[in-house]
Image (cartoon, rainbow, N blue to C red):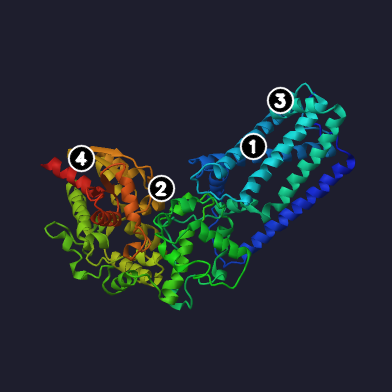
Amino acid sequence: MPIRPAFWNIPFWAEIGVYVVGLVAVIACIIGICQCVRLWRAGRPLNLPEHKKDRWMGVWRDAFMHRRLLKTPSGLIHFFIFWGFVFLFFGTATAVLDWDIAHYLFDARLLKGNLYLAYKFILDLAGLLTLIGLAVAAWRRFAVKGKKLERSWRFAWILTSLAIIVLTGFVVEGLRLAAQQPEWAIYSPVGYAFSLVFLKMFTPDQLQGAHFTWWLVHGAGALIFVALIPFTFFGHMFKAPTNIYWRKLAPKGQLAKIEDIEEQESFGISNFDQFSWKQRLDFDACTECGRCSEVCPALRAGAPLDPKALVLSLKKRLHHPNDKELVGDIVSKEALWSCTTCGACMQACPARLDLPSTIVDMRRHLALEMGEFPAGLAKALQNTQSVGNPWGMDPASRLDWAKGLDVPIATEGKPVDYLYWVGCSASYDRRAQKIARAMVKILHAAGVSFAVMQEERCHGDFARRSGEEYTFQLAAQENIENLRKYQFKHILAHCPHCFNTLKNEYPQFEGGQFDVVSHTQLILGLIDSGRIKPQLKQAEKVVFHDPCYMARYNNSVGTPRKILDAVGGITRVENLQRGKTAMCCGAGGGQMWMESSTKKINFIRLTDLRRSASTVAVGCPHCLTMFESAMSEDKVLSGMDIEELSEIVAKGLDNVQS
């Protein structure tokens, strides 16, 4: 009967030795893990919700099933390497159960008969796939030109060491099969192939000697690997899943509130010791894959922000304390101010690092303690504080966009279905005002009960993401107080920044819970119910640009596309960068108000969209403004047509009515 030959050809002293060395390796690994945990726990306390079911499901999806990685070739390679080693690990664990527990304690064997044959076949297949994955990974990293991957001896040794462990395992198996020549050797296909080679190379006595030598090499290599896991790059094997488990469960677009802000003596993060334990875990869990840098719009535009380099500098500081200033030396101020907080790095990160929130924490130090702001941003903040909008426009002119339209004003005691939150862009920017006017046409055409609020002011999103939390909190409290005066079922917002702030951030304040819907949700509902049937007179080929604060932060990707598909005359095409992987327009994180000397993100993004279609549909007034600005400064882009979704739908309604 086929049965696993435990410790075949291994002398008793070596059998005892492997247990002793194995125990030392496991102890060293545990000590290293404990040291890492102590480093994390040295950070500022932070209470995170348990929600164990959601957290474990996230670990399964992201750490084991590689949900975020499988869409790329490198992710697929890592998937095979990872699962290859998982099967090899469980194969070793099963062998321990078979010999050390079942054999010694119960005088029984688990790995025998067909189960043993299946066991050998699966492990051989796992080892082969692992080797193929390692070979392809080495080829992509060191042979393929144009790949922005680190080509260093460190990564060469990382891939080589893993390959050595698997290869020596096959060598040991092949030597044993060559010496024993069991009838079932074919069930170990890779080992069997090795055995055929060894039969021609060695005599029977030489086979046994070589087997024992390579058994020692393989065992030593595997146990050294186990011992060094926490102290090397391989530490991400436990750090990344741990970070995924403790990932942010709150809405992606929500930043932490500074409680009792009037009583605080310090703000934000100015030295490394102020980072929370979760932020320290973030830094340590970085896998150095570089996906964050690949998708960062600021880096692509030539700004001094490289997400991977920033995280690695913080990781280095975590493990090697020094007296350098956090903001200025370890992380440059220019890098912090370059972030658009678009969330692309967070979306791409396989370890679920929340870098935008960490950047905002350091911005809070610059804004609230140092009073340092880039040119242009300080003026926008002053305007918001004084007159309630970043443009510095007269608050009395906020509803000028509605002249000539039948726009009801919210009145106390008079309930409506929707309170339409217009936002500053559509209130003061002439081009963006067309969005509000289009929305009113749609609402009237569908017979929707709505009103606008006379007291509306800037909700403070750009201030909060610029680190000026105080301005944001004052705006939030004032807006919530005004909103509570009126009776309505829903707040309607056409701006993703307004939507995200009202839906995800105002609930942090007393009385700030409202049912907030985006204009895309409402418009699609009106179309599906037959209350509006937009139809264009002339056919248009349109590509949709996804706003960061809807696609990534609020998972709204399909709704705007369904709207375009429902508008008669529209032929929708897709850009390669779409949905949650779409590139930012460059307006977020206060960038719309900052002066930049680098090549602007909006030019890069609009040029990319132009390759798909000359007409671009957007779902955000900030995207509209950024693209219109790019068109006005670039002759190549000047012939494009930028339209907001509501404008396209309203145009279709006009054509139907006429």
- Residue holding disc 1: 131
Viewer-side label of 3, 4: 3
How many discs mark residues in the rendered view?
4
The residue mark sitting in front, 2 or 4, is 2
Q: Quadrant of residue 299?
A: bottom left
Q: Residue beneath label 3, please?
A: 187
Structural distance between the alpha carbons of marks 4 and 1? 57 Å
User: What's the mark number on residue 580?
Assistant: 2
Query: In the rendered image of this protein, does residue 44 appear above or below residue 212?
Result: below
| CA distance for labels 3 and 4 | 65 Å
Q: Quadrant of the C terminus?
A: top left
Which of disc 2 and disc 1 is earlier in sequence? 1
Near-viewer residue (170 or 246): 170
Q: CA distance from mark 1 to mark 3?
A: 19 Å
What distance separates the C-alpha of mark 2 from that of mark 4? Answer: 29 Å
Q: Is residue 134 above or below residue 314?
A: above
Q: Which one is earlier in the sequence, the residue at label 1 or at label 3?
A: 1
Kind of residue at badge 3: Tyr
Q: Residue at x 85, y 35 (%)?
A: 209
Name above or below for residue 608 compared with residue 433. above
Q: Amino acid at mark 1?
A: Leu
Looking at the rendered structure, the kind of residue marked 2 is: Lys
Q: Secondary structure at mark 2?
A: helix
Q: Is residue 541 left or right of residue 322?
A: left
Residue toward you, 209 or 471: 209
Of the two numbered discs 4 and 1 on the same chain, state the one appearing first in sequence.
1
Q: Position of residue 608 (x, y in %)?
A: 34, 47
Marks 1, 3: nearer the viewer = 1
The residue that mark 4 highlights is 533
